Amino acid sequence: MSEMKQLPMREEVPVALTWDLTTIFTTEAAFEESFKEVQTLIPELLALKGTLHQGAAAFLKALEFILTVSQQLEKLYVYSHLKNDQDTANATYQALYARCGTLLAQVSEAMSWFEPELLTLSDEEILGYLAEEPKLSLYRHYVEQIIANRAHVLPEEQEALLAGAGEIFRGPSTTFSVLNNADLEFPVIEGEEGEKVQLSHGLYGQLLESTNRRVREEAFKGIYQVYRQFRNTFATTLSTNVKSHNFNAKIRQYDSARAAALSNNHIPEAVYDQLVQVVNENLPLLHRYMALRKRLLQVEELHTYDLYTPLLGEAPIRYTYEESVAKAKEALQPMGPEYLAVVEAAFNDRWIDVVENKGKRSGAYSSGAYDTNPYILMNWHDTLDQLFTLVHEMGHSVHSYFTRNNQPYVYGDYSIFLAEIASTTNENLLTEYLLKTESDPKVRAYILNHYLDGFKGTVFRQTQFAEFEHFMHEEEAKGTPLTSEFLSEHYGALNQKYYGPALTIDEEISLEWARIPHFYYNYYVYQYSTGFSAASALADKILAQEPGSLDNYLTYLKSGSSDYPIEVMKKAGVDMTQATYLREAMQVFENRLNELEALVDQLID
C-alpha cells in the first residue's frame, strides 16, 4: 500500500488556490460593524408590524426595509459559512458561523409577521396599492406569488398553531437523521488488502465502486443487515412523515400532498406525471445498459452491488487542476463571449477554493450572496469526475452571477427546479467536447460510460424515487398502513421493473427505502430528473447553433425568480409542460448507449 498523504494545513495552501473572501469584508472589523448594524435593525422590523393597512406608502416602506435587512444579513451569513467551511476546526470561524445562525433566527422571527399581515388585506386593497404607488410595480410578481395561494392560507390563529407545531411536524425527519447518521453502527468488513474496514455511509459508496467483487458484496450486505434490524422503526418515521404531508395538504385544502408541494413554485402536476410516464416508456434502454454492464463485468449474475463499479477498470484519463481549467474553457466555448468572460473571472479572480486541506468541508458546491462573488468550493483530485464537478459548479456560479447582475435583490435568486439545469447543461457540453476531441476507443468508452452512469443515477434512479414517493403518499391518503413489509414489497417490485431482467433480485434492495433521506424532502427528487433532461435538450440546441438558442439560454440565466420557473424555461426554449424535452434526452441516452455497445464490441474483439 502507498504511504498515506498528509493533508496540508489551511495556512499551507498556496494563496492562488484559495478563494478571496476579502471582497465580501476587507477586515473582521468590517464584518463586526455590519453585524452590529443588523442587530440594531431588529427593533425597527418589529415596529413596522401592523402598518400594512395604512396605505401604499407604508406598505412600500415595510417591504423595502425587510428586503434591505435580508440582503445585509445574507451577506453576513454567507461570509461566516464560507469561512467556517474552509477550516471547520477553526474555533474562531465556528463561533462566527454560530453567531450568524443565531442572528438569522432572530431576524427571521422579527419579520415573520409580514406575509400573514399582508394576507389580511384583500386582493383589491393590495392591487390598489400596486396601482397607486409607481415604485411598487417592481414588486408586483413578488406580491402576486404571496397572494396566489391565499385560498390555502388559514385564519391567523390556525396559522399560529401550525407554525408552533413546526418542530413536531419535522420530528420524523429529525428522528430519521439522528438514527441514520448518529446511532446506527455498521459492521466491520474485510477491505481490498485484507485490512479491517469500518463501514460508514461515506465509505459505503466508495466500496461499491471497488473492483473487488467480494468487497462490494460484503459492503452491500453489511449495510442492509443493519437496516433490516431497524426496518420497523424506519417505516414508522417515514410513514409519520408522509402522514404529516398529507395532513398539511388536507387542512390547507389542496387536492393532495403533491399538489401542495408543487404549488410553491407553481409547477403543474402534469410535469411530474409526464416524467414518470416517459421514463417508464424508456425503461428498455436502461435494461439494455444493465445487460451491457453484465457483459462487460463478465458475471453470471448481475447484482445490485455490481451497478457502481467501473466497467473499464482504471481510468484511462485524468487531469490536473491546471489541465482541467483549460479543458473547461474549451468545452464551454459554445456558450459565447459573455458567458466565457464570467468563467475567466471565476478562474482569475479567486472565486474557487481548490485543494483539500485539513478540516475543510468535504464535497463541492457553489455558494454566495447577492452582494458577493458566486464562490466555488472544491476538494481537488486529478480525476475525470473532478473535471465534471468543476464545470457543474461553474454552471451554478455563472447562473448566480447573471441573475444577481440582471435582477434586483427581490428576484436575485432562483428555485431548485431551475438550478440544476444550468449546472447539467455544462456537463453535457463537456461530454460532447470530450467525445469530439478524444479518439482512443478506450477513452471514448470511459467517457460514454461516465455519461450513461450519470443519466442512470439522475434521470432513471431519481424518477424511481419520485414514483415511489408519490405511491406512498397516495396509499397513506387511502388509509393503507405503510408497514415495513408493505414498503419493501412494493419498493422491491419497482426496483426490478426499473433495472429489468439482467439484474438478479437481491432481497436486501427491497429495504433501500429505509436509507434514502430524500424521501423526507417532500416531493423534491423529481427536479433532478427534469433538470437533467431539460439541460440535455438545451445543450443540444446550443451545440447545433439553433437560431436564438444561446440568447434564449442567457435570458434564462438572467431571469432569477422574476417569473415562475415554468415560464422562465419557456423563454429558454424548453416547454416543460410538454414531454418533448424528456424524449429528446432519452434519444441522447440511446445514441450514446449505441456507441458504447459498438465500442465494446471493438474493444472485446
Image (cartoon, rainbow, N blue to C red):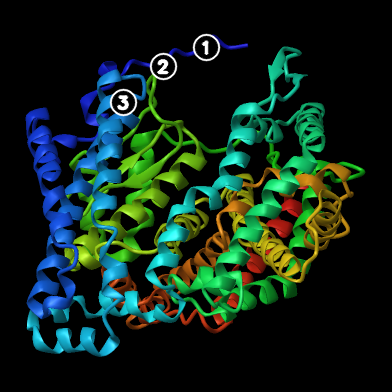
Q: Amino acid at mark 1?
A: Met
State left or right for residue 402 relative to residue 255: left
Instruction: Return the residue nearer the eye: 99 or 275.
Output: 99
Residue located beneath label 3 in the image: 94
Say whether disc 1 or disc 3 marks the residue closer to the N-terminus.
1
Task: Name above or below for residue 465 compared with residue 79.
Answer: below
Residue identified by numbered label 1: 4
Q: Is residue 254 among the parts visible in the rendering?
A: yes
| Three-letter amino acid code at the position of disc 2 | Leu
Q: Residue furthest right?
A: 300
Amino acid under label 3? Gln
Of residue 373 and residue 230, the one placed in the foreground of this image is: 230
Q: Which residue is mark 2?
A: 7
Cα distance in 3D space between marks 2 and 3: 20 Å
Q: Quadrant of the N terminus?
A: top right
Number of numbered tags placed on the structure image = 3
